Amino acid sequence: MNAQTQPSTASLDARATAALLPWSALADEIEALLRQLQNSCSVSVPPRIVMPTAAGNCLFCMPATDGQVVMTKLISFTPGNARMGRPTIQGDIVVFDAATGVRQLILDGPTVTARRTAAVSLLAARRLAPRPQGALLIVGAGVQGSAHLQAFAQGLGTQEVWIHSRSASSAQRLADEARDLGLHARITDDLEEAARHCPLIVTCTPAQAVVLHEAARPDAFVCAVGAFTPQMVELDPELCRRFLHQGQIVVDTADAAHEAGDLLQAGIEVDTLPTLAAVVHQDWSRSTKPVLFKSCGWGGWDLAATRLALRQHLLRQPT
């Protein structure tokens, strides 16, 4: 097959990509990938390439394969776009067949990033949260705030959400979205009160400054996703140290050892912390102590999302 005869590849927009990645199925696929890592050497996820571009901007290249599906995510990260109403993450995921090299699908990169990140949080909450059915506090009302709202509502059955954001309009949009999903929603400026009320907390801000100082509940589950470089931070260092000494810290992957800004700036030896893979492989019991789950991102999460999306896409094709 040459360039003239190769069939065109479906290129899906954000809506079509999201339709292929239902929340619970995506969390299940991520868990399946982690189990496959334990029992097979077919999964390969090289370290992601992060190339600085303009000041404060980066280009990410994240390849991965499970021996059957080959994918690469190529996205730009431009934090300053948020001030101008433009997306901060843009790009695509290209999917190939490992045996033939044929390009099979092109997915919307920001949609996969948002959904796989929230689905990893959902899996962590399923496994680790002392009280997974409790009220949810979302700090940061952007794309990830919306993704985590949907994931927790549909995957955990969350019924109540508190929302904190520097932007009143963003907070209102997320509250409206929550109410459309049938949730009780409250916008708050008092994070201490919200943290006392909500056992589930997700921080998903641009991670330019500390936003969460307290998680006082003994059944707290904090999922910190905003900071994914050593310079970024969302959590107060003392809060991180309290989780270390009085509760439990779990990181998404071993790559967090050089990416988890919250923990690194708290002086915590990240490479000694358990990963989500260990939680799955060892079938941990639900925690009875406060838990901090630090998520930095990994190409394997994109591989899991890609596998699910490709299966769903092929099932929908006419025979």
Image (spheres, rainbow, N blue to C red):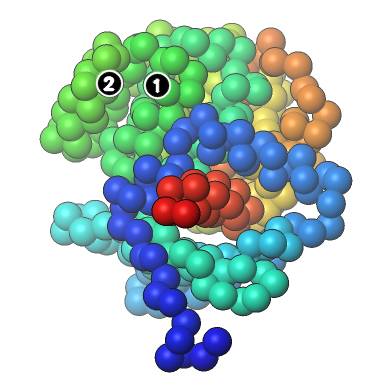
Furthest residue toward left = 169
SS state under label 1: helix
Amino acid carrying mark 1 in the image: Ala
- Up/down of 21 relative to 8, above or below: above
Please give the residue where the numbered disc 1 appears in the rendered image: 153
Q: Position of residue 70 (x, y in %)?
A: 62, 66
Q: Quadrant of the N terminus?
A: bottom right
Residue 224 seen in this snapshot: no
Q: Residue at x 57, y 24 (%)?
A: 125
Q: Nearer the viewer, residue 16 or 151?
A: 16
Q: Residue at x 36, y 11 (%)?
A: 159
Q: Nearer the viewer, residue 109 or 272?
A: 109
Q: In the rendering, which numbered label is found on residue 91?
A: none
Q: Left or right: 219 with respect to 107?
A: right
- Report if the CB atoms under discs 1 and 2 are less than 8 Å apart: yes
Alpha carbon separation for disc pair 1 and 2: 8 Å
Q: Nearer the viewer, residue 73 or 268?
A: 73
Q: Residue at x 45, y 86 (%)?
A: 5
Please give the residue where the numbered disc 2 appears in the rendered image: 181
Q: Left or right: 312 with respect to 187?
A: right
Q: Residue at x 77, y 45 (%)?
A: 36
